[in-house]
Image (tube, rainbow, N blue to C red):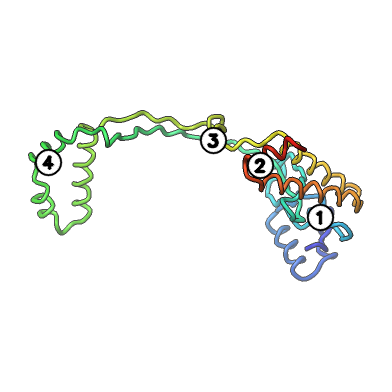
Amino acid sequence: MPEINWEAPILMNVQGFSMEFIKTMNDNFLQQLVTKPTRGRAGQKSNILDLIITTEENAIEGITYGAPIGKGDHTIIQFKILSAFTMEVIQNDKPLYDKANFDEIRDYFKGIDCSRTLTTLEDDVEKQWSYLKKVYDKIVTKYVPMRKTRPVTGAENLKHRKALDRRILRTVKRKHRLWQRYMETRDGQKYEKYRKERNKLKSRLRAPAGACKKYCKAS
């Protein structure tokens, strides 16, 4: 819908599907917040094709426009959603089945007659399941040790992420800066610089871990 002027999206300037789209947004009190072109290549007209549509304008803030991913030509749009919520953290105990007291479990089963009980309940699958579940829970509680577990926080989870070489991170930043300069000036030479930096980053990210480290240090 490149023909829509999002600075003043009125029905008299559009037709067809675009008109129906604007009419639907107006009927449902929706707002579109993207104000800069989000798609375009050197020598082509840029358009707003990627949208942020919301019913509450004040719930969105910090909209930024970044360089495309890989060889794509759509700008990355990042924004914050302002929302209040309560997060409940549930902590469960983990049964250590490999450390269970199987001798006592066998003795426990000698004292009950599961087959007889299940036979009396053969016409009611729900009651059979409820009985087996009760037996299982009792065995786990009495004969299986537990280990306390705790949720992994975001900071702890960072330890499991693959660290990027600092030079790669600098290449990412240069790529985004060059894209911003191109979008501001629409200069073909600036687009060519952005394209070269994009390809350099792609090569570094695809290189094997050891080769990437050596390659980054050499450049």
For the residues bearing labels 1 and 3, Cβ distance under 8 angstroms? no
Q: Nearer the viewer, mark 2 or mark 3?
A: 2
Looking at the rendered structure, the kind of residue marked 4 is Phe
Classify mark 4: residues with Cα within 10 Å, few (<14), some (14-19) or many (20+). Answer: few
Q: Earlier in the sequence, mark 2 or mark 3?
A: 3
Q: Is residue 34 above or below residue 142?
A: below
Q: Nearer the viewer, residue 153 or 190?
A: 190
Looking at the rendered structure, the kind of residue marked 1 is Trp
Q: Earlier in the sequence, mark 1 or mark 4?
A: 1
Classify mark 2: residues with Cα within 10 Å, few (<14), some (14-19) or many (20+). Answer: few
Q: Nearer the viewer, mark 1 or mark 3?
A: 3
Q: CA distance from mark 1 to mark 4?
A: 73 Å
The residue to which callout 3 is attached is: 160
Looking at the rendered structure, the kind of residue marked 2 is Ala
Q: Earlier in the sequence, mark 1 or mark 3?
A: 1
Asked which secondary structure carries label 4, the reply is helix
The residue to which callout 1 is attached is: 6
The residue to which callout 4 is attached is: 109
Q: Nearer the viewer, mark 2 or mark 1?
A: 2
Q: Earlier in the sequence, mark 2 or mark 1?
A: 1
Q: Earlier in the sequence, mark 4 or mark 2?
A: 4
Q: CA distance from mark 2 to mark 3?
A: 21 Å
Looking at the rendered structure, the kind of residue marked 3 is His
- Which disc is residue 211 wearing? 2
Q: Nearer the viewer, mark 1 or mark 4?
A: 4
- Image coordinates of residue 133 in percent, x first then y, are 23, 45
For the residues bearing labels 4 and 3, Cβ distance under 8 angstroms? no
Q: Nearer the viewer, residue 22 or 170?
A: 170
Classify mark 3: residues with Cα within 10 Å, few (<14), some (14-19) or many (20+). Answer: few
For the residues bearing labels 1 and 4, Cβ distance under 8 angstroms? no
Residue visible at 72% across and 38% down in the picture: 216
